[in-house]
Image (cartoon, rainbow, N blue to C red):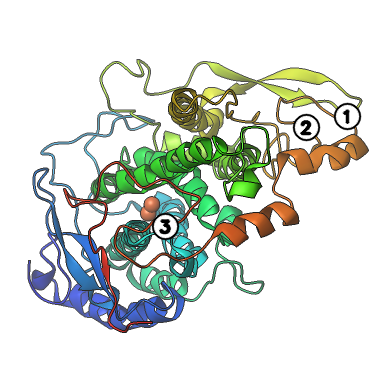
Amino acid sequence: MSGKIPNNVDLSSDRKLQRALESWLPKYLDWWKEMGPEGFQEDQIYLRTAVSVETDGWAHFDHVKMPEYRWGIFLTPNEKERTIGFGDDMGKPVWNEVPGDVRKELRRLIVTQADTEPASVEQQRLLGQTAPSLYDMRNLFQVNVEEGRHLWAMVYLLMQYFGRDGREEAEDLLLRRSGNEDSPRILETFNQPIEDWLSFFCFTTFTDRDGKYQLGALAESAFDPLARSTRFMLTEEAHHLFVGEKGIARVIRRTADLMKNAPEGDPREVGAIPLQIVQKWVNFWYTSSLDLFGSEDSSNSATFFASGLKGRWAEGKEGVYDDHKALEGTYRVEVPKEEGGFEDRDIPLRRAMNLVLRDSYVDDCKKVMQRWNRELEKSGLSERLYLPSDRFARSQGLYAGMPFDPQGNLLKRDEFEAKKAQWLPTPEDREYVKSCMVQCKEPGEYANWIAPPKKGINGQAVDFEYVKFTRPN
Ligand SMILES: [Fe+2]
Ligand SMILES: [Fe+2]
């Protein structure tokens, strides 16, 4: 590890690549200062930095200023004689260069993944100002710097393997802006504002979890450098999912606690986040994240699978799938008919790969929901949270724009409009949640609406000084 850019890709032996990355670095830093966490660039944050890919001790923890974070490039080690694990070329050696016939598709996959990384940093840039504790503020910034590193990981692939096109894409990744009308981020979920911490916890639970499954599918790729980059990204991603899931669990615990002082009343009277509000936020972010998987029936997904670019979740794991060619078999979906009702359609398996991946994701989300409901049970509350139907509030695929309720029943349009406020965040809900968001800057201090965590980060206490401010303010 040496030079300006920590790495395990032997950057110092490739002058051309090194120069390209070093000229991108100041542009990246300009972007970070403009679009990264606002107001905390001079403060010392207790962050983990990836320093190698060894399973024991890949990360180093210390207080650092975010602009001085060492964003590095790390790939998991080469597996000798790795072969392609699925699709038409199954069993052939993996690629260490980009084959000409899939160059465009591969570039598109990498750029789409890369674009989500800076997008989420932009979406979250104001949240530090309402952090409910120094512990949470630190977790937010940890997620942010690692999304920055994920951008580095993808930019390395673009610059190393896609020549001039790749360098241009790398520039464009710093030019698009989340939510910008003229030059938005590529995927819609990444253009939605994240203005409160309930949204942040739902985003890290559901949208970062989409990321986990997309990365998992790319970790199977025949293009070995992509597989090895995404495998290491998954290590970091686990922490982002932890932040989201535990964040919501702490909200649930705190609401249950506060309700003991207002057993019949409105949770709002005691400054708690009502569970109905948590459910609405879940409904919004979960369904928006389902959209990220794309259409149920997709010729692109068939191409990606056939050519070995993108596999299924755990494609290479023993005992999960017997058939890695997926030339036979179908996937049944219910398609809404114009005159009302549904008809079954069987999609050839390769064309249904978006759905197959989404199913793995949904199973994972169900487990999260069970853990949250166990938290409710332990707290003695009778309410439970649920995952809405995959037909509800969709903008992509078979059910896009149709008035389904969260149970998946098709309603009349006006009935849906009349009931929508029960299921999705209203301006009043957002107003209330915002009113709860107050910044807590003393070590060990936690905002009223959220319980402290049970444990701190890296063995530190929950009242550890996770953020050291340079200026008292
Ligand atoms: Fe990421
Ligand atoms: Fe993430």
Examine the image and state in which quarter residue 339 appears: top right
Report whether 443 appears left or right of 420.
left
Is ligand 1 less than 8 Å from the beta carbon at label 3?
A: no
Report crowding for label 1: few under 14, some 14 to 19, many 20 or more residues within 10 A (C-alpha). Answer: few
> Percent x, y for residue 36?
41, 73
Tell me the element at label 1: loop
Tell me the element at label 3: helix
**Image quarter hosting the C terminus:** bottom left
Report whether 161 appears left or right of 332.
left
> Percent x, y for residue 30?
38, 83
**Image quarter hosting the N terminus:** bottom left
Q: Nearer the viewer, mark 2 or mark 1?
A: 2
Q: Nearer the viewer, mark 3 or mark 2?
A: 2
Amino acid type at image mark 1: Glu
> Percent x, y for residue 210?
46, 42
Examine the image and state in which quarter residue 118 appears: bottom left
Q: Which residue is identified by label 2?
A: 404
Q: Give the residue displayed 32% in from the left and 41% down from the top.
A: 221
Tell me the element at label 2: loop
Report whether 462 appears left or right of 400.
left
Q: Which residue is identified by label 1?
A: 338
Q: Give the residue displayed 78% in from the left and 24% down from the top.
A: 409
Q: Which residue is identified by label 3?
A: 107
Dot placed on the residue nearer the N-terminal end, 3 or 2: 3
Amino acid type at image mark 3: Arg
Q: Give the residue displayed 43% in from the left and 34% down from the top.
A: 306
Q: Is residue 268 above or below residue 323?
A: below
Residue 302 or residue 226, whichever sits in front: 226
* C-alpha separation, residue under disc 2 versus residue under disc 1: 15 Å
Observer able to see residue 103: yes
